[in-house]
Image: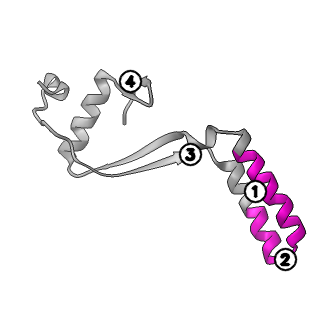
Amino acid sequence: MHPIGLLGCHKDETEIVDITLTFDNYKIIQYLKERGKLISQMKYKQVNKINRKISKYIKDNQEHTQPIEAFITFNTEEDHIAALMLGKIGFNIYGKTTQHFT
């Protein structure tokens, strides 16, 4: 039996329409804003410096590649409820067990 069926919802499948992931990439965004400002001011030597900073940051910091949140759009309200029920029994994402899903 599908685990959701154990909780009283008898769906065999839950349809997800879209998933949007968010990342911890604030620092990269700040660097890119600074880079854009320098490009608009035609300060190309400084653009090269910021490009090196960006490359070094990306190489030295891998946390910006791991999703920190997911925004999930379901096909129907029933699919949404089924997913909420699944969250009550826990599930595994990226090797981490989570008990909270809203």
Q: Tell which circle, 4 or 1, labels the residue nearer the N-terminal end.
A: 1
Residue with the mark numbered 4: 99
Q: Is residue 49 left or right of residue 11?
A: right
Residue with the mark numbered 2: 41
Q: Callout 2: helix, strand or loop?
A: loop
Q: Quadrant of residue 91?
A: top left
Q: Which residues are magenta?
A: 33-58
Q: How is the image coloured?
A: one colour
> Residue flagged by tag 1: what amino acid is it?
Tyr
Give the alpha-carbon distance from disc 1 to disc 2, as whole Å: 15 Å
Classify 10 Å Cα crowding around label 3: few (below 14), some (14-19), many (20 and above).
Answer: few
Q: Position of residue 94 (x, y in %)?
A: 44, 31
Classify 10 Å Cα crowding around label 1: few (below 14), some (14-19), many (20 and above).
Answer: some
Where 99 sits versus 23, above or below?
above
> Residue flagged by tag 2: what amino acid is it?
Gln
Q: Tell which circle, 2 or 4, labels the residue nearer the N-terminal end.
A: 2
> Residue flagged by tag 4: what amino acid is it?
Gln
Q: Callout 3: helix, strand or loop?
A: strand
Give the alpha-carbon distance from disc 2 to disc 4, as whole Å: 50 Å
Q: Callout 1: helix, strand or loop?
A: helix
Q: Tell which circle, 3 or 4, labels the residue nearer the N-terminal end.
A: 3
Residue with the mark numbered 1: 31
Q: Quadrant of residue 4?
A: top left
Q: Is residue 41 left or right of residue 1?
A: right
Q: How many marks?
A: 4
Q: Is residue 24 left or right of residue 3?
A: right
Of badges 4 and 1, nearer the viewer stands: 1
> Which quadrant is the C terminus positioned in?
top left
Give the alpha-carbon distance from disc 1 to disc 3, as whole Å: 15 Å
Q: Tell which circle, 2 or 3, labels the residue nearer the N-terminal end.
A: 3
Q: Tell which circle, 1 or 2, labels the residue nearer the N-terminal end.
A: 1
> Residue flagged by tag 3: what amino acid is it?
Phe
